[in-house]
Image: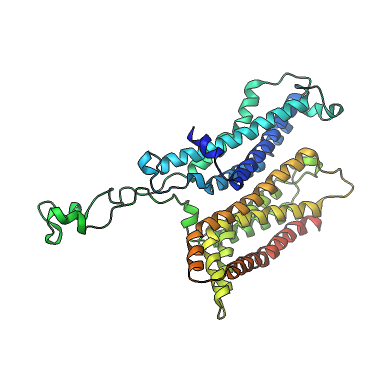
Amino acid sequence: MLALRLTRGARTAVQLRRLLVAAASAGTGFLLLCALGHAMSHPADPTASLLRLAWCTPPLAATVYFSTAVARTDPATTPRPGLSAVGLGPARLMLVSATTTALATTLGSTVALLLFLYLRGDLTGLPFDGTGADYLAAARPLPVPGTLTLLAIVPTTATAATAWVLRPRTADAARPRHGATDADASPPGRWSAGVRPARAAWVSSPPAPDHPPAPTPAADKANPLAALPWGIATLAAGLAVETYASRAEDPTPVPLPGGLAASPTGLLTGWILTAVGLALTGPGLTHLTGRLLQSARPGALRLLAGRVLMAEAPRIGRPLGLVCAVASAAYATTALHDSSAPSLGPLTTLGALVVAGCTVATLLTAAVETKQARTDTTAALLRLGAPATVLRSAAALRATALLAVFAPLTLLVAELATRPLSA
């Protein structure tokens, strides 16, 4: 009930992000149901049906990643003073956030089911002159257990991921109890520095706040440069695997969706390693970009932009790397696509839109999260007399620096990935 009240009373921007999560969940759920329809229409070809189900994994992963990013930026579930007194500690707020994610993704799965039933003709007859009825198994009864199982994949996975990311990590044992004093911590039978018990509470340290600090994901506290060597090594290994697989003959190539030419298994493995390498190098490259902005006698503008970029590196670095991976894959697909070949099918286009839209939306959501984390710092700078134009110029400088670093990297990775195949 509390999750429903918080969901209903949220601001317009928060509601828009939740609707985007529902839209992504609807797209992924529809792809899963289409895989079920193909399996029902082609019972003699289970391998193709399993392959279609496997190609739903990238949209599913992108949807879950986007839903966790939206849950982290939800202001309704941020720990505030006084909430612990009414029983809303970090654990309860985590449950509220997970419930809100479950509501949004369940709404998307319901929309996907209604759209699937509509295209099958179960609601108002076959639309569009029965186009696609063969892949939707319109002439066969829909199995309820299998349908509900596929529709439950997105809400269950997204809710579990949100609960895992936002789980409380505060070490309660290391923090003093609420109202504990220095005299309480003194050895038995002695008073701390000769203070009488009646005055011990007055001279002791201030009590602990009534709410613990907001849970910070481990990725936000880690050193962004720690994963940079591993990311570079993974990226190099992915490019090497792609080059080797393009020259070797694979007797059982994996068919790509949308009528694309079949690709060797090693080539797909190299693409996965390349995407993982870009995601791992994102935080480190963002941190180094911030350092580069502060080099060579920086002024106030470059110093502010570089410092903020270094602080933002753990949050926006990985989404930036994933956006680069998706952009490089799109560039490589466009470069290798034969103009005489058939165009991409609607399901392939839908899956590509879900993956690309979720990665870009996750990056924008991470930018909103960093802006929320800098609220106190921005207010302090404004109180000190810093002009608002300086803050906007610093934000523009950060965006320009990131574009100057990651855009050439994306083009370079895409060219290196496509050159062995086009040779």
- The quarter of the displayed image where residue 415 is located: bottom right
- Where 258 falls versus 386 (above or below)? above
- In this image, 216 relative to 255: left or right? left
The color scheme shown is: rainbow
Residue 256 visible in the current orientation: no
Q: Residue 251: x and y, percent?
A: 75, 42
Q: Residue 405: x and y, percent?
A: 65, 66
Residue visible at 20% across and 59% down in the picture: 203
Q: Residue furthest right?
A: 340
- In this image, 114 relative to 131: left or right? left
* Count of marks overlaid on the render: 0
- The quarter of the displayed image where residue 274 is located: bottom right
Residue visible at 22% across and 53% down in the picture: 181
Residue 341 visible in the current orientation: yes
Q: Residue furthest left?
A: 189
Q: Nearer the viewer, residue 307 or 240?
A: 307
Q: Residue 236: x and y, percent?
A: 64, 60
- Where 24 falls versus 326 (above or below)? above
Q: Nearer the viewer, residue 284 or 86?
A: 86
Residue visible at 65% across and 21% down in the picture: 144
Q: Residue furthest bottom?
A: 297
- Where 325 falls versus 33 (above or below)? below
- In this image, 259 relative to 385: left or right? right
Q: Residue 211: x and y, percent?
A: 37, 48
Q: Quadrant of the C terminus?
A: bottom right
